[in-house]
Structure formats: C-alpha cells, structure tokens
Image (tube, rainbow, N blue to C red):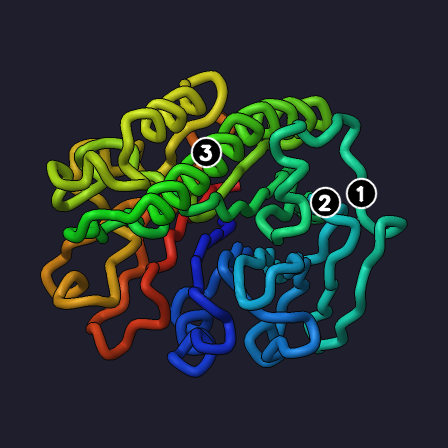
Amino acid sequence: MLRLATYNVNGIRAAQRRGFAGWKQRCLPDVACLQEVRCPYDALPMEAFAGFHVAYDAGELKGRNGVAVLSRTPFDAVRVWSDQAMFISPAGDARMAGADELSVPDYPLARPLRSFNHEGRYVEVDLADQPLTVACVYVPKGDSLLAPGIRSRDPLTDEQLAGVQRRYDRKMAFLAGFSRHLTRARRAAHAAGREFLVVGDFNIAHTRLDVKNWRPAQKASGFLPEERAWLSEQLSPRTLVDVVRAAHPDQDGPYSWWSWMGQAFARGTGWRIDYHLASPQLARRSARAFVDRDHGADERVSDHAAVVVDYDL
C-alpha cells in the first residue's frame, strides 16, 4: 500500500512551527507533494524533511510558490520546468542539481508555460520502487482580489480592473499550456510502462459539491465557468480520474481549503481545490481517499488540509 498526500503548506517555515512534523508522524505518508513551500534554498528547515528523499524547485520569486516531492524511497528521475532543483537526502544532506542531473522529457514544454518556468510551479518524479510517475503542481490563483472565498464589495479602480484582467489572462494561459503538458506527460509515462498521477493545488473548484457557498462563488476566481470547464476537459475514464470525487461521488467536499478569516474553518465553509488526478488503472487501485482535516482552528498547520489517498500497488 502506498500512501500519497498532497499538501499546500502555505510556507514550510510557518507550517513547521505550526505542527507539520506532527502531521507527518500522524499521517505517515510514503510520498508527500508540497505546494507553496515559499522558502529559498538556503533557508529551508531541514528537520521538516527528515527521513525523506526530496526534490524541490523553489523558483525565483521571493516568498512565493515553490513545489517539492518527498519520498521515503529514492527517485529514478526528477523533472522540473527550470534548469535546477535541490535534492535532499533522508539524512538532511542537500545539494543543488543542475540540468545535467535532471531528466529531460522527450517532448518540449508547451509554449504558454515557458513564462512560468522560473516560478517553482511543477516538479515530476519517477519513483524507483514503483512503476509510477508523480507530478506536483501549483496552479496560479488568478485574480487575487477575487480569490476563493473573497469578494470585494468596493468598486474597483481602473488600475485594479487592469490587474484583475492580467491575473485572469495569466491563469487561463497557464491552463491552456498545462492541458497540453498533462497529455504529453501522461502519454510519456504510459510509453515507459508507468502509471501517472498529478496532484496539487489547482485553485479550481470543479462542481457545486466542491464549494460550500457555491452561488456567490460563481463570479469568483476559482469557480468561474471557464475554469470549471477546463477541469472537466482533463477528466475522463480513459485519461485522468478525480480519485477523491470517485470515492465520494455525492458528498459535499470533502473540502481542502478554508479562509483564515472569520469562522470559515469552524463552520465548514470550504472549497475543494486540491486534487489527485490519476491514470485510470491507478485510480482503480485507490483503497481509501480522504482529507486529513485538522481538528480545531488553533491546530491548523495551513489554510489547506492534506488530501491523502492509499493506493494498493
């Protein structure tokens, strides 16, 4: 059984202070994919990764983004969109890996993604002990003024409106390129005899079941019709399967994100924006899928909760 978790930690240094180590001990993942690590290489809290092989792309945007894959067993290959990443051993030894140590896919990066290749948004690994490729992604939020759960009541200035449009256009460009990338990565894994799994924070809630207050959310970034349609296009019984939704077909949620503001967490006013999207055969091997929600608001490690699936491999 392989337990794999995806977790937007909202800053690894803050998450470590809030109890990330305790979460690892409680959840016991074999593989953990992290988003919004938000830490430069030289400031990483190495104790957060103890016992794991780690591949980390911090990106170049200070205090933003950053994705990592942690695995109890080594990697056969690591691929990122930039030309470097950090490798960390279970003993805490860290070294920078340049392009000569990173695996190069036999397909080009989709053109719309090339402007994102320095942002630390994607890392993909081949596990050494399983015929499985795991990709970890952090999709742009889009409009920060209309982020999930937040709506501005005040009229926007022309400058603010222009910013909204830029962020919207940028997210949609990412999605267009990422659709092509997913197809290429999935087919490459299949050609190599591997199952394919992409996990992470997609910053999109797919259906009404995925947002507690879905009616007012329909005009908010993360629940726009075109974003939801994009996610629908990625899913089918022959391409990628939403593993958690397949396990909980009629359930509200299970939500994985709650605003820090107000009583959203206590009231269960959440969004489901963190996913496991698996190749069909791998999806059929899902034995259990759940959101590892913190018990109380004062125990929260992040504004997200880990989404965990046990795969019977």
Find out whether the residues at labels 1 and 2 contact each other: C-beta distance under 8 Å: yes
Res 7 visible: yes
Q: Is residue 283 above or below residue 47?
A: above
In which quarter of the view is residue 210 placed? Answer: top left
Q: Position of residue 13 (x, y in %)?
A: 50, 77
Res 275 visible: no
Of helix, strand and loop, which one carries label 2? strand
Q: How many marks?
A: 3
Q: Which mark is residue 214?
A: none
Give the mark nearer the N terminus: 1 vs 2. 2
Q: CA distance from mark 1 to mark 2?
A: 5 Å
- Which residue is rendered at x = 21% and y = 73% of the image? 297
Which residue bears the numbered disc 2?
79
Foreground residue among 74 and 146:
146
Q: Is residue 46 above or below residue 283?
A: below
Neighbours of disc 3 within 10 Å: few (<14), some (14-19), many (20+): some
Amino acid found under the numbered disc labelled 3: Asp
Which residue bears the numbered disc 1?
103
Which residue bears the numbered disc 3?
169
Q: Which numbered disc, 3 or 2, marks the residue closer to the eye?
A: 3
Amino acid found under the numbered disc labelled 2: Arg
